[in-house]
Image (cartoon, rainbow, N blue to C red):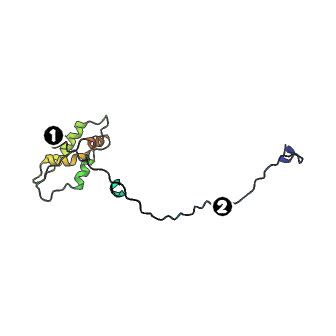
Amino acid sequence: MRTRNSHFPNNSPVTIPRRRNRRRAPNVVEPELRTIVEVAPMADNRTMEELLQAPTEGYGEAIVIPEINADHFEIKTNLLQLVQASPFHGFERDNPHTHINNFKRITSTLKFRGVPNDVIKLMMFPYSLEGAARIWYDKEPPNSILTWDDS
């Protein structure tokens, strides 16, 4: 067996660096203090907050809800949960006709004085969609569904 010394004789010009056990200093990053400098106003005089807001023009709900003349009308959370219990995802195996029939069966049980049943259907329908079906609904043109028969 050869050792280090036998492989490189003492009269050899080659030096072998020895490994040293050094303690490593921990990597400490000193915080850099910066001052907030006022940014020059933009050319169109809008603030950064205004620039970061998403545009709302051209975006809107596809379904237009007619004005309701009933006092104190609201859809309760448990009714929304009932509609959301069996959402339509838009998968190939999903049958849209079955979903619509189930949805109509649920919403036909709801009766509110002064509120037509079609209005309730229009209000609750978006909550029955998920996944690809919801994406389809969101891509519908704004204000394009005015009645239940339009949907």
The answer, for residue 88, to whether it is visible in the render is: no
User: Of discs 2 and 1, which sits in the foreground?
Assistant: 2
Residue visible at 24% across and 51% down?
Answer: 80
Q: Is residue 101 above or below residue 67?
A: above
Q: x and y percent of residue 95 in the render? A: 26, 36
Name the spot of residue 34 as percent of width and height, x first: 50, 64
> Residue 25, labelled with which disc?
2
Question: Which residue is at the far top?
Answer: 92
Q: Which residue is mark 1?
A: 149
Q: Please identify the quadrant where the C terminus is shown.
A: top left
Q: Could you tell me which secondary element the residue under label 2 belongs to?
A: loop
Is 6 positioned to the left or the right of 88 in the image?
Answer: right
Q: On the rendered image, what quadrant is the N terminus found in?
A: top right
Residue 54 visible, this angle: yes
Query: At 20% from the left edge and 54% from the top edge, which residue is drawn?
Result: 75
Tell me if 112 is positioned left or right of 84 in this view. Answer: left
Crowding at label 1, few (<14), some or many (≥20) Cα neighbours within 10 Å? few
Mark 2 is surrounded, within 10 Å at the Cα level, by few (under 14), some (14 to 19) or many (20 or more) other residues, namely: few
Residue type, numbered disc 1: Asp
Name the kind of residue labelled 2 in the image: Ala
Q: 79 and 60: which one is in front?
A: 60
The quarter holding residue 125 reads top left
| Mark 2 in CB contact with mark 1 (< 8 angstroms) | no
Residue 52: percent from the left, percent from the top? 35, 54
Quadrant of res 101 = top left
Q: Secondary structure under badge 1?
A: helix
Residue sitting nearer the eye, 49 or 60: 49
Residue projecting furthest to the front: 43
